[in-house]
Image: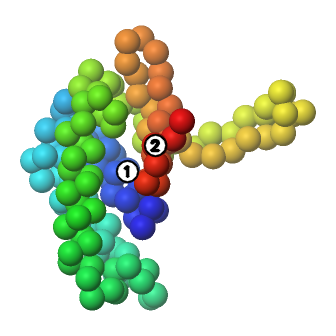
Amino acid sequence: MGTFVHQVLARVFRTALEKDARRGEEVRALAAGGLLEEAFSRVEEEWKGRPNPPFFLRRPDWPHRRRRVLRLLARAFEDDEQFLKGDAEIVAVEEAFARAAPELGGLEVRGTIDRLERRSGSHFYLDYKLGSTFPE
């Protein structure tokens, strides 16, 4: 479910960037105006079309769970304090990175940043966490 939600969020932000909506308030307006539901439905359709769709999409209670997950995502986009600040400028989505970490003996660290944004002259790297507890 976490990967599914990440793909929905990535699709919302990518589509917003394609529409040249980079500010948090612009993305929020697009999400509330139907983009979130559209992205959710498209990812859901793609995943259901897989040869072996994930179990959560095949469960009889999926329509109920679907509404719940969509409501949670909608609330996240409404959150101007934690998830998406109105003055944020979206720079990149699902950005891959790799660099050597001298402090780790030159070990190459690789990964994907869920979202990169600029606020108040600084860059913020965001990694979504979908667990039930808030990370410290």
Left or right: 9 as drawn, with respect to 104: left
Query: What's under tag 1, amino acid-wise?
Result: Ala
| Residue nearest the viewer, comparing 42 with 76 | 76
* Quarter of the picture holding the N terminus: bottom left
Q: The residue tagged with tag 2: helix, strand or loop?
A: loop
Q: Is residue 70 above or below residue 56?
A: above
* Quarter of the picture holding the C terminus: top right
Please identify the quarter of the rendering in which residue 6 is found. bottom left
Left or right: 107 as drawn, with respect to 93: right
Left or right: 34 as drawn, with respect to 114: left
Q: The residue tagged with tag 1: helix, strand or loop?
A: helix
Query: What's under tag 2, amino acid-wise?
Result: Phe
User: Residue 112 in the image: x percent, y percent?
Assistant: 57, 46
Which is more foreground, mark 1 or mark 2? Answer: 2
* Crowding at mark 1 (Cα within 10 Å: few <14, some 14-19, many 20+): some
Q: Residue furthest right?
A: 105
Residue annotated with mark 1: 10
User: Residue 40 in the image: x percent, y percent?
Assistant: 26, 62
The residue that appears at 33% across and 37% down in the rendered structure is 83
| Residue nearest the viewer, comparing 104 with 49 | 104
Q: How is the image coloured?
A: rainbow
On residue 134, the disc is 2
| Residue nearest the viewer, comparing 133 with 67 | 133
Q: Is residue 44 above or below residue 26?
A: below
Q: Residue furthest left?
A: 33
Q: CA distance from mark 1 to mark 2?
A: 21 Å
The residue that appears at 84% across and 33% down in the rendered structure is 104
